[in-house]
């Protein structure tokens, strides 16, 4: 079940915020779009490309309002939430277009408002609608979303589940140092700040090791231990799971009591405000995942991605909002799960990436017993960094992708300087993801997943028009994502 806030004060504040949003929407129709993702999935790149393509007349054949010519103007406007940092679109797009480097990843929440003037496709609607829609894009780290299930767990449940997971697969090696400290700790002894700090540091180091590129694991709550920000060193972040006895309660003033109190403080100070002030006010949501990286890292990374998606989707209640639900706790009525980096594959494999991700999502939906209505899945590339070509080998045409590897990237023992292009065979995804997942679930010994070359390419060099204006950022299926996420609001 999705986490719920039980405090009357919290519920009242959510209702008040939603009422204020609806009142504002009567004057200026708005859709609040949440953008998040799991570990290096490209949230910042997605938002930057979406905004750039809308502002600069990008090629968007599947985004009906633009394709039909009904959108007359697009502009950035001041965001409505003055306490939330602005998404620095201009800096990020300069990095992509001018410097041809990927912008820094999301480390905190930010927001950007883009407004479209349009003509409704319905003559009746044109009489009553102002023909204007503002899209408030709320960008937040995926780690924060994975924290929401903690609202429904007490400290004992959190400790037992986290320690049990840490003893599985590759995590057992990564968690060895932290678990040794945990099992050596006298949990009924007097609370000691230095012991608490050592345990919290070792636990955070374990989470960081799981997240590292060479493992690419996804289920890593509490997320703010990875992105502490201005709470770094605070008691609310200086805690860790403990190895607790099967029954009994903590002694007053003990290490157990301290850790339990700080865990509850983490939920109150970090998780609840995010849920109340941001998540509970979203209308639409896109969750970006790097399924290719998980495939490259092996069966355990794929299973962990599925586990993370299960936790993520359990946070949503997709469905149509009634007036009452929109005031008291509106639903996110559309959720898109998008597998990024489709440009790392030949177009023949795009549908396979789509099918693989869809199977991950379907399995997650089955596990939590929710309906799939309002949820869609697709493969996309927010910025297309490669082009397709073919090479002759043994008398056959071999499909390849061509791009400029990042400086320092090594392919087949060759180190690249960031300037020279190369062609690589991207590999093939399985045609039948069902059988692949069955083999993963069965724990088939020595199972090897299909090899996919995940090379870090530089962003493309954009050509200029005769007037010196750079063309819009190229993409794959970004227009289809726009149509699902807010195309209906421009009908």
Image (spheres, rainbow, N blue to C red):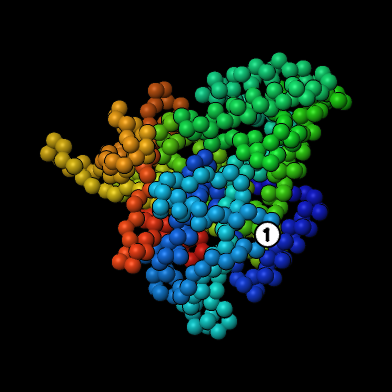
- The residue located at (57%, 59%) in the rendering is 112
Q: Position of residue 170 (x, y in %)?
A: 51, 24
Image height of 481 relative to 254, above or below: below
Q: In which quadrant of the rendered view does residue 133 lie? A: bottom right
Residue 145 position, x and y percent, is 61, 45
Q: Residue furthest front?
A: 468
Judging depth in this view, the residue of 265 and 249 nearest the camera is 265
- Lateral position of residue 275 relative to residue 415, left or right: right
Residue in the image at 37% along x and 61% along y: 470
Which of the 4 image quadrants contains residue 423? top left
Q: Is residue 319 visible?
A: no
Residue at screen point 75% across, 62% down: 16
Left or right? Give the position of 164 relative to 125. right
Q: Is residue 113 above or below residue 234?
A: below
Q: Considering depth in this image, is 444 or 137 the residue closer to the camera?
A: 137
Residue 244: percent from left, percent from top: 74, 23
Q: Secondary structure at mark 1?
A: loop
Residue 101 in the image, given as x and y percentages of width and height: 42, 45
Density class for disc 1 (Cα within 10 Å; few <14, some 14-19, many ≥20) is: few
What number of labels is visible? Answer: 1
Among all residues in the image, which is located at the extreme left? 395
Quarter where residue 476 is shown: bottom left
Image point (65%, 16%), residue name:
180
Closer to the camera in the image, 339 or 269: 269
Q: Which residue is mark 1?
A: 82
**As drawn, which residue projects farthest toward the top?**
184
Q: Is residue 102 visible?
A: yes
């Amino acid at each position: 079940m999705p986490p719920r806030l039980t405090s009357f004060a919290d519920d009242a504040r959510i209702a008040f915020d939603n009422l204020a949003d609806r009142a504002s929407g009567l004057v200026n129709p708005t859709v609040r779009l949440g953008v998040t993702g799991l570990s290096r999935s490209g949230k910042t790149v997605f938002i930057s490309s979406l905004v750039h393509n809308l502002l600069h007349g990008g090629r968007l054949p599947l985004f009906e309002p633009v394709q039909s010519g009904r959108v007359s103007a697009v502009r950035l406007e001041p965001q409505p939430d003055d306490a939330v940092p602005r998404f620095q679109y201009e800096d990020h797009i300069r990095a992509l277009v001018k410097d041809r480097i990927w912008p820094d990843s999301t480390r905190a929440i930010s927001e950007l408002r883009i407004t479209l003037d349009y003509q409704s496709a319905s003559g009746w609607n044109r009489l009553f609608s102002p023909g204007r829609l503002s899209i408030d894009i709320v960008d937040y780290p995926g780690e924060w979303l994975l924290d929401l299930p903690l609202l429904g767990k007490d400290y004992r449940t959190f400790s037992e589940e986290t320690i049990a997971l840490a003893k599985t697969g590759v995590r057992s090696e990564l968690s060895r140092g932290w678990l040794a400290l945990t099992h050596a700790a006298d949990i009924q002894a007097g609370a000691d700040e230095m012991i608490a700090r050592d345990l919290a540091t070792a636990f955070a180091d374990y989470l960081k090791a799981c997240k590292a590129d060479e493992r690419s694991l996804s289920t890593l709550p509490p997320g703010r231990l990875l992105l502490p920000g201005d709470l770094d060193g605070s008691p609310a972040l200086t805690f860790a799971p403990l190895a607790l006895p099967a029954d009994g309660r903590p002694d007053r003033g003990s290490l157990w009591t301290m850790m339990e109190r700080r865990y509850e403080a983490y939920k109150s100070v970090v998780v609840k405000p995010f849920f109340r002030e941001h998540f509970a006010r979203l209308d639409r949501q896109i969750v970006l995942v790097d399924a290719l990286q998980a495939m490259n890292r092996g069966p355990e990374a794929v299973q962990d991605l599925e586990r993370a998606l299960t936790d993520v989707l359990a946070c949503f209640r997709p469905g149509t909002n009634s007036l009452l639900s929109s005031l008291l706790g509106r639903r996110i009525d559309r959720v898109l799960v998008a597998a990024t980096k489709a440009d790392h594959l030949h177009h023949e494999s795009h549908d396979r990436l789509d099918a693989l991700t869809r199977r991950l999502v379907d399995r997650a939906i089955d596990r939590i017993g929710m309906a799939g209505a309002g949820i869609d899945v697709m493969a996309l590339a927010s910025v297309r960094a490669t082009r397709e070509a073919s090479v002759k080998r043994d008398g056959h045409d071999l499909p390849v992708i061509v791009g400029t590897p990042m400086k320092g990237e090594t392919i087949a023992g060759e180190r690249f300087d960031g300037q020279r292009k190369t062609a690589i065979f991207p590999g093939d995804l399985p045609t039948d993801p069902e059988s692949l997942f069955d083999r993963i679930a069965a724990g088939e010994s020595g199972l090897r997943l299909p090899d996919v070359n995940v090379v870090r390419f530089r962003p493309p060099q954009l050509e200029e028009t005769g007037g010196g204006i750079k063309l819009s950022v190229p993409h794959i299926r970004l227009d289809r994502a726009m149509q699902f996420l807010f195309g209906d609001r421009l009908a």
